[in-house]
Image (cartoon, rainbow, N blue to C red):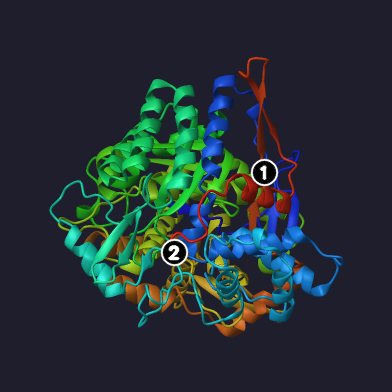
């Protein structure tokens, strides 16, 4: 599970360092930033080499995510890049600038759909202008491995200009067939009912160690009506990219410690075989390796992009431990049983023996796949419930990313615009970063790993609502315990003011400010955003009689103010209890009703207001990053004697370089 950055507009009181948070590019609703890799230069050479090898592996899977997000993405991206490389005589021409913005959006989202909402981008250049540019390209510039020039041109034009074609990446609307109404490329010719029946037959409710069925495959309907899984493995789908990934992983294994070498070699075995039992063995070995200072995520991991929650997008992260900051997460994880025992959930859903909970604060060294350019600020893995129960989980908070976000937010006027009371603004200015990091720690370290399923519950019963409710469960856990006296006892916060800062910013964001991320006329689609509104609206409604949370209009502006922090914590605990029950019992109807009632619909007047206020501040609500560049230094024999890290690449330059260096898949992977 990942924890996205719910509010990138809170300041960090620490001194500004070299490049963290500096803006590289801005377009549409997006800021592209830099992040530092503090401490890399002082790492021992073996760790630098390991990071370099893992970083290359992280970049080699870039095409996989494009293809997973929509089967036409690679054709569109390669065609757009060909037009861009051909250049223009008038770089300030309005349609050229609109085209350039569209291409930057496609790069950022790894495809033609918005990375958060899933809605298809609307071009601001004309079809006639585009067709003229396309016609001027020579054949060798076009991705003709998909078909003839006529065929490629037709499909690219239709994807870009037909609003009804591939309109939404993943559909989650009640009453729709969630597969046939989605453009994501995890299923081919398969209806929702057919996919659910297919995987139900593969699932044994009595298996104590069930594999994550469907995780690493595309489900395809054959001409004769049979359903077949086409597995993502070497020799199967995505083989050219996976072969390159494995090549770099083999180098990494040779440079790793014995324990970590076993982890990497098991991942390589999984990529070669596609066997999900092997994936479980990899996950167990990965979660048990808590000593390696350099760590990584590489593989088919999160299922947010599949409305049914079976298929996993490809993602990668390379990181190394921040020893000083990790003391905070170790203090939390060492008390995991205490937190479980004192949780407000039902006794039968508490784990009697919490095991294997490890947590650390890390610095990201490379982002890839579904973690790039937009990236989470925290990760808790593995996702399989039985592995978490028997072997534990590993949690990370990504400190250099949160620091970059906070540095970028300094002086942007957000607090003054959206937080009404001076005392609340002061709390957030003093405690906001600490409180936000602590909430992330609790969310990732313990929230996702808490609780247990009832006997006979598989864990996939909540279907399209599962991701939202799982994020809500972890968020509620973090919110409930952020205000517990245990935080002061552990020395994590000086007093209760940090929790009040977190409650103020969370409620304001969930009920109001996050709406700046939604286009006019749209509803909330993304799981993390649905989760935050669900929590905000549910607690607002339940506490209405006592004015626990109050909506105030002052000077023609709307604010949401927390009046009773203790009562709000009680409501968080009450909601955590119900969400845990829904998950533990697999209560689809209750989960559906909760999300549909509170998490999706938007008040149009509030929406229009927040968009207007954000626009006046000039704040772009989404942010992502360019990666650092690692360059090996070799001696006369070719041996690596150092690895240099630089952070000066432009956004466009990096995207074009990645397309040159890491584009291994054919344009059409459905043939």
* Residue at the limit of the structure toward the left, as seen here: 206
Residue 185 marker = none
- Residue 323: % across, % down: 54, 29
Q: Residue at x 65, y 22 (%)?
A: 642
The 10 Å Cα crowd at callout 1, few under 14, some 14 to 19, many 20 or more, is many
Could you tell me if residue 61 is visible in this image?
yes
- Residue 409 drawn above or below residue 602: above
Circle nearer the N terminus (2, 1)? 1
**Could you tell me how far apart the alpha carbons at marks 2 and 1 are, in whole angstroms?**
39 Å
The 10 Å Cα crowd at callout 2, few under 14, some 14 to 19, many 20 or more, is some
Q: Residue at x 58, y 75 (%)?
A: 154
Towards the viewer: 46 or 247: 247
Name the secondary structure under disc 1. loop
Total tally of numbered discs in the picture: 2
Q: Is residue 321 left or right of residue 585?
A: right
Q: Quadrant of residue 48?
A: top right
- Residue 522 drawn above or below residue 549: below
Q: Is residue 215 left or right of residue 69?
A: left
- Residue 391: % across, % down: 28, 38
Q: Residue at x 54, y 32 (%)?
A: 53
- Residue 195: % across, % down: 27, 68
Q: Is residue 519 left or right of residue 353?
A: right
Name the secondary structure under disc 2. helix
Residue behind mark 2: 567
- Placement of the C terminus among the 4 image quadrants: bottom left
Could you tell me if residue 44 is visible in this image?
no
- Residue 261: % across, % down: 40, 26
Residue behind mark 1: 35
Towards the viewer: 354 or 209: 209
Q: Nearer the viewer, mark 2 or mark 1?
A: 1
């Amino acid at each position: 599970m990942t924890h996205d950055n719910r509010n990138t507009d809170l300041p960090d009181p620490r001194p500004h360092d070299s490049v963290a948070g500096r803006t590289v590019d801005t377009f549409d609703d997006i800021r592209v930033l830099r992040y530092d890799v503090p401490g890399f230069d002082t790492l021992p050479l073996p760790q630098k080499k390991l990071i370099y090898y893992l970083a290359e592996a992280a970049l080699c899977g870039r095409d996989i995510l494009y293809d997973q997000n929509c089967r036409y993405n690679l054709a569109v991206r390669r065609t757009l890049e060909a037009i861009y490389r051909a250049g223009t005589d008038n770089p300030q021409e309005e349609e050229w600038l609109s085209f350039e913005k569209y291409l930057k959006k496609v790069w950022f989202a790894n495809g033609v759909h918005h990375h958060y909402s899933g809605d298809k981008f609307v071009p601001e250049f004309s079809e006639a202008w585009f067709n003229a540019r396309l016609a001027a390209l020579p054949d060798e510039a076009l991705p003709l491995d998909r078909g003839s020039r006529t065929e490629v041109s037709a499909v690219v034009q239709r994807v870009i200009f037909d609003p009804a074609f591939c309109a939404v990446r993943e559909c989650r609307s009640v009453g729709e067939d969630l597969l046939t109404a989605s453009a994501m490329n995890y299923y081919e010719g398969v209806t929702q009912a057919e996919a659910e029946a297919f995987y139900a037959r593969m699932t044994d409710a009595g298996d104590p160690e069930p594999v994550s069925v469907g995780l690493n495959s595309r489900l395809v309907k054959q001409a004769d009506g049979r359903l077949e899984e086409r597995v993502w493995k070497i020799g199967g789908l995505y083989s050219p990219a996976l072969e390159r990934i494995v090549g770099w992983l083999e180098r990494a294994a040779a440079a790793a410690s014995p324990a970590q070498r076993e982890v990497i070699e098991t991942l390589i075995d999984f990529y070669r075989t596609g066997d999900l039992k092997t994936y479980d063995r990899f996950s167990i070995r990965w979660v048990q390796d808590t000593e390696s200072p350099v760590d990584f995520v590489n593989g088919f991991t999160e299922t947010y992009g599949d409305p049914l929650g079976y298929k996993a997008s490809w993602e990668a992260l390379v990181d190394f431990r921040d020893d000083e900051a990790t003391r905070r997460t170790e203090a939390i994880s060492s008390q995991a049983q205490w937190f479980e025992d004192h949780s407000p959930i039902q006794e039968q859903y508490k784990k009697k023996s919490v095991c294997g909970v490890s947590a650390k604060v890390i610095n990201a060294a490379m982002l890839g796949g579904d973690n790039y350019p937009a990236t989470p600020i925290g990760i808790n893995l593995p996702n399989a419930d039985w592995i978490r129960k028997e072997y534990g989980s590993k949690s990370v908070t990504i400190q250099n990313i949160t620091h970059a976000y906070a540095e970028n937010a300094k002086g942007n006027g957000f607090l003054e615009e959206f937080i009404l009371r001076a005392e609340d603004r002061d709390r957030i200015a003093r405690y906001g970063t600490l409180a936000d990091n602590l909430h992330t720690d609790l969310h990732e370290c313990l929230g996702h790993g808490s609780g247990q399923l009832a006997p006979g519950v598989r864990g996939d019963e909540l279907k399209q609502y599962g991701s939202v409710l799982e994020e809500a469960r972890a968020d509620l856990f973090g919110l409930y315990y952020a205000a517990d006296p245990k935080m002061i006892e552990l020395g994590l916060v000086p007093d209760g003011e940090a929790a009040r800062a977190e409650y103020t910013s969370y409620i304001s964001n969930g009920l109001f400010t996050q709406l700046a991320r939604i286009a006019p006329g749209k509803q909330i689609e993304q799981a993390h955003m649905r989760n935050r509104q669900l929590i905000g609206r549910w607690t607002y409604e339940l506490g209405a009689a006592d004015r626990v949370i109050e909506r105030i209009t002052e000077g023609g502006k709307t604010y949401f103010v927390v009046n009773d922090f203790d009562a709000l914590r009680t409501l968080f605990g009450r909601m955590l209890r119900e969400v845990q029950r829904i998950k533990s019992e697999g209560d689809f109807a209750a989960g559906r009703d909760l999300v549909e009632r509170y998490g999706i619909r938007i008040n149009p007047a509030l929406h229009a207001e927040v968009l207007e206020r954000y626009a006046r501040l000039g704040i772009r609500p989404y942010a992502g990053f360019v990666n650092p560049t690692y360059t090996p230094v070799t001696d006369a024999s070719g041996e690596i004697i150092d690895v240099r890290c630089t952070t000066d690449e432009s956004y466009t330059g990096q995207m074009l370089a990645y397309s040159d260096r890491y584009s291994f898949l054919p344009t059409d992977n459905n043939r």
